[in-house]
Amino acid sequence: MITSHKKIDLWGKTLIETIIIKAPYRLSVNFPQQACFIYYKKGKTLINSPAEQVLVGSDESVILNCGTYFTNLLEYSDNDFYEILVFHLHADMLKKLYRQEVPAFLKKDNERPYIQKIVSKDIIRKFIENLEFYFENPAFINDDLLELKVKELILILLQSKNSTSIKDLLRDLFTPHELNIRDTVQRHLYSTITVKDLAELANMTLATFNRKFIEVFQDTPANYIKTKRLERAKELLLVSTLSISEIAFETCFNDVSHFSRSFKQQFKVTPASCRERKANTPPAE
């Protein structure tokens, strides 16, 4: 539940917003034409993108490139409230601010991450404290000041990301990713997100995702994902020293009994017997 939401606009668009959220709460966003700087003043969560998952905690910040994301804000031992500041970086706004400095965002680089942590904590903290002053004193806010704040954040990000120029930084933020459904599925095979979550990350309805999944993999999502996780579990049983419960956890089976039943159904042998057979197999000469 959102208990507090304040925002500051520039040129008719939300530029900065502060949000206080009481967990549990699911936060889903799709940024087709913007990037976002997000600072977690309080709270810890796992942010999911089509390509990765990134853990973020209190006093940490991230940049989200244009794309689709979700995070489940869960209750935790320290507190069940999240305090978040979001600084929206709109592509058209930055083009206007930087004019000829902004590139056409045409270069493709699919190896770039969607989510990037910012390491300059002290600098970021001072920047956030300064922004909080304007939320408390809105009479001081005007467009000229907000334009300067955008450029200040860009310079901070430029130092944090070790980019060679503003042009390179903005290109990285706004170059569209071209991950397909196969890439999204493969990169989340061993995470705990659901088929519905995968559909959201792929920016599809669940029905469309299921249909396209079958076209690509010739199998249903549930069966394909379960099979791949069991194959990975079998591999870990044969080559690792992890316990059976650890392997179950590593392959997203939270219930060891369910894991054992599924494993036996798939391979006609229990996990323990599979490992025992490997131990009793003489080494090849």
Image: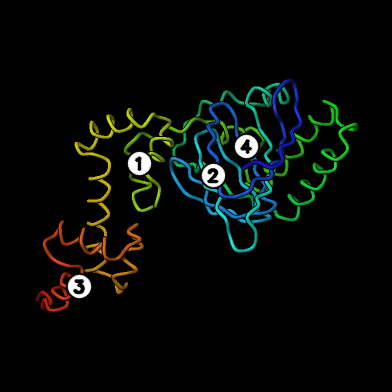
- In the rendering, which numbered label is found on residue 272? 3
Q: Amino acid at mark 1?
A: Val
Q: Amino acid at mark 2?
A: Ile
Q: Residue at x 86, y 33 (%)?
A: 138
Instruction: Classify mark 1: residues with Cα within 10 Å, few (<14), some (14-19) or many (20+).
Output: some
Mark 1, residue position:
195
Label 4 SS: strand
Mark 2, residue position:
115
Q: CA distance from mark 4 to mark 3?
A: 47 Å
Q: CA distance from mark 3 to mark 1?
A: 29 Å
Whether the residues at callouts 3 and 2 have beta carbons within 8 Å, the answer is no
Mark with earlier residue (4, 1): 4
Tell which tag, 1 or 2, sits nearer the viewer. 1
**As drawn, 120 above or below 14:** below
Mark 4, residue position:
36
Q: Residue at x 60, y 30 (%)?
A: 34
Q: CA distance from mark 3 to mark 2?
A: 39 Å
- The quadrant holding residue 242 is bottom left
Q: CA distance from mark 4 to mark 1?
A: 26 Å
Q: Residue at x 20, y 72 (%)?
A: 272
Q: CA distance from mark 4 to mark 2?
A: 10 Å
Q: How far from the left and from the top, in percent, is residue 160?
A: 66, 48
Instruction: Classify mark 3: residues with Cα within 10 Å, few (<14), some (14-19) or many (20+).
Output: few
**As drawn, 85 above or below 275:** above
Front-lying residue, 173 or 50: 50
Mark with earlier residue (3, 2): 2
Front-lying residue, 45 or 241: 45
Q: Amino acid at mark 4?
A: Cys
The reply, left or right, for residue 86 in relation to residue 274 is: right
**As drawn, 273 above or below 199:** below
Image quarter of the C terminus: bottom left
